[in-house]
Amino acid sequence: MSHHEEAGEVRAVIERLGLPGLIDVHTHFMPDNVLAKVWDYFDAVGPMTGMEWPITYRFAEEQRIGLLRDFGVLRFTSMIYAHRPDMAAWLNAWARDFAARTPEVLQTATFYPEPSVEQYVDLALGSGTRIFKIHIQVGDFAPDDPALDATWGMVSDAQVPVLIHCGSGPAPGRFTGPDRMRTLMRRHPRLRLVIAHMGLPEYADFLDLADRYEGVHLDTTMVFTDFTEALAPFPPELRPRLDELGERILFGSDFPNIPYPYLHAVEAVERLELGDAWLRGVLHDNAARLFA
């Protein structure tokens, strides 16, 4: 299927649901040299694990933006994340510029446990950041690290969401899993969090966290697709809980770093058959409300 045909299929879903478009809370735009290293990592995954991970949308930045527009995506993010000190502030500066020249972007920032973190998070909040992204596995730091306590307080007070990769999939890290996230939420119960990949593979634990704290959301990124169902299937007995928490589930794709078409990410959510009202919420309305 050509990208033009694929865009037509995605737009057909949007039109059937009567939506103005999609809001995708989990897309990766970052400096070219950083993205190239991310792609190198995925290229190496196949030989290392036997699990091939082709990058479906390995294109220049402008072409990737154009594809999302063609797909009918109204708003999307530039998920950046730091894996060492003295990186986050630079990434945030790049993301500010990217958002300034890309009207559809929800300005994104990141942070890392380091002495300057409160200074650059304050700058990010003051310059229009709409969402933060941190990656516990890649960053290799604890979300409940005391060095971040004041920063979490700032973000909580501002009610700016943080999209956090904290589940133990696709590979566990030293600090991944639900336990430290429970500690974090006990300290900062008003935090607005978006749990990446539905907390894969600890789906039930992160659904429990959302049950307990109304600011906890979950994104559908890569979950429910054929690719992820072969690795860490979503338990069928948990499906009713998706309906119960329907207003706090957000569509995410991981574009462009996905090993299948964007259309499949949309269809994977659609084929859960939880109803059009639920689907409209996930694909657009819930995120529109969160970022209003």
Image (spheres, rainbow, N blue to C red):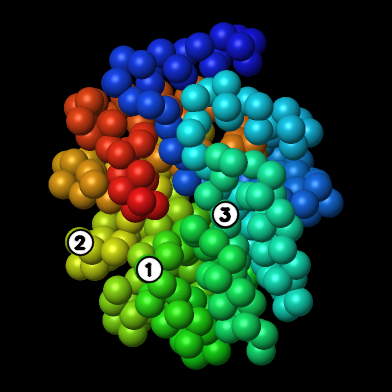
Q: For this view, does 220 lie left or right of residue 145?
A: left
- Hey, what amino acid is under mark 1? Gln
From the viewer's perspective, is 288 left or right of 171?
A: left
Q: Residue at x 37, y 68 (%)?
A: 159
Distance between the alpha carbons at the discs numbered 1 and 2 = 19 Å
Residue found at x 59% / y 66%: 127
**Is label 1 in a helix, a strand or a loop?**
loop
Question: Is label 3 or label 2 in front?
Answer: 3
Q: CA distance from mark 3 to mark 2?
A: 28 Å
Mark 3–mark 1 Cα distance, whole angstroms, equals 15 Å
Residue at numbered disc 3? 107
| The one of 175 and 117 positioned closer to us in this rendering | 117
Q: Nearer the viewer, mark 1 or mark 2?
A: 1
Disc 1 to disc 2: CB gap under 8 Å: no
Residue 159, labelled with which disc? Answer: 1
Point out the residue furthest to the right here.
33
Q: Amino acid at mark 3?
A: Gln
**Quick check: marks 3 and 1 in contact, CB under 8 Å?**
no
Which mark is first along the chain, 2 or 1? Answer: 1
Vertical comparison of 135 with 102: above or below: below
Sequence-wise, the earlier of marks 3 and 1 is 3
Residue 291 showing in the rendered view: yes
Q: Which residue is depicted at the point 28% across and 31% down?
A: 279
Residue 18 position in % (x across, y down): 30, 20
Q: Secondary structure at mark 2?
A: helix
Name the kind of residue labelled 2 in the image: Asp
- Image side of residue 199 versus residue 123, left or right: left
Residue at which label 2 appears: 211
Question: What is the crowding at mark 1: few (fewer than 14 residues within 10 Å), some, or many (at least 20)?
Answer: some
Q: Which residue is drawn at the image coordinates 31% and 62% (left, top)?
A: 216
Q: In the figure, residue 119 lies in which quadrant? A: bottom right
